[in-house]
Amino acid sequence: MVFLTRRATFSASHYYWNEAWSAEKNFEVFGRCANRNGHGHNYTLEVTVAGEPDAVTGFVVDLKWLKDVIEREVLSAYDHRHLNLDAPEFRHQIPTTENLAAAAWKRLEPAIAAAKGARLSRIRIYETPEIFAEYRGEA
Amino acid sequence: MKAYFGRRYLLSASHRLHREDLTAEQNLAEYGKCSNPNGHGHNYVVEVLVGGAVNAETGMVIDLVSLDNAVRDDILDRFDHANLNLDPLFEERVPTTENFSRAIFALLKDALPSGELEHVRVEETENNFFECFAEG
């Protein structure tokens, strides 16, 4: 088994807000991340795919293909967008880095599962160089 | 749903790799310039990964501020701008980064406000790093 990782970057804005809470509680829990006009990050997305290298091509998956899948499924929805306002999955879900990693998994997993012999293994998203989250498909 | 939250911290510390049971020559053979008598220092990067259920109300595995507080109280306040050899943990153990990463894992695993410590990575320089995982 070989693990292959492709990195991509995107820039997006967001804010943290739980609709069921008062404004006071939102600011108490989320601090300045709750500022209603949002703020932004340069995110780095790492997509890790696992599989056996193909006997003929030597590839787990074709990197150009994976790059195009990431572009189509994730970057087109998130890059230079406001996650709360532009991405349907975050209309009623807080776009924390944890939720963003799981959402990127949901967007990518069907296309990667359809590719012969490879499976999505891990999504890691850096919100800043010092803060990141991972999702590994666990319930 | 289980996810993981990671955070990277910087700490600067000095250390010296040597053992009392070895002669100066043997220490030099074993540890090279790392055994120079007056020690030396590094900017260590400590990467902490916490796993757990994503809280349905906050969308978080662990609150960033509470994680920062735990790491500050148990790791940074203790080791940042300190001499690792003088810490009681390294009285009878060489402060290699292997041992340092294990010490950080042990100190932090019971100090987290939520979630489970999944891994600790300590980068001693840009060219070497050491990892400890929950499974040992």
Image (cartoon, coloured by chain):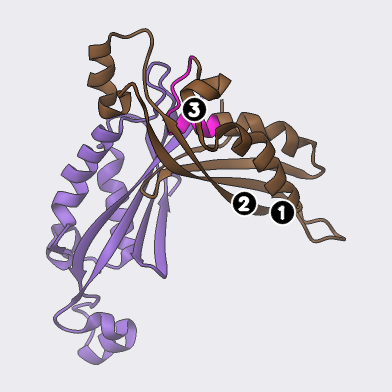
Kindly state the secondary structure of the residue where label 3 is placed.
Answer: helix
Tell me the magenta residue range: A92-102
Asked if labels 2 and 3 touch by Cβ distance under 8 angstroms, the answer is no
Q: Nearer the viewer, residue A8 or A139?
A: A8
Name the residue at the right extreme: A56
Q: Within 10 angstroms of label 2, few (less than 14), some, or many (20 or more) residues?
A: some
The three-letter amino acid code for the residue at tag 2 is Arg
The three-letter amino acid code for the residue at tag 3 is Leu
Q: CA distance from mark 3 to mark 2?
A: 22 Å
Q: Nearer the viewer, residue A36 or B108?
A: A36
According to the rendering, which colour does chain A have?
Answer: brown
Q: Chain of mark 2?
A: A
Asked if labels 2 and 1 touch by Cβ distance under 8 angstroms, the answer is yes
Q: Which residue is mark 1?
A: A63
Earlier sequence position, callout 3 versus callout 2: 2
Above-or-below relation of A75 to A34: below
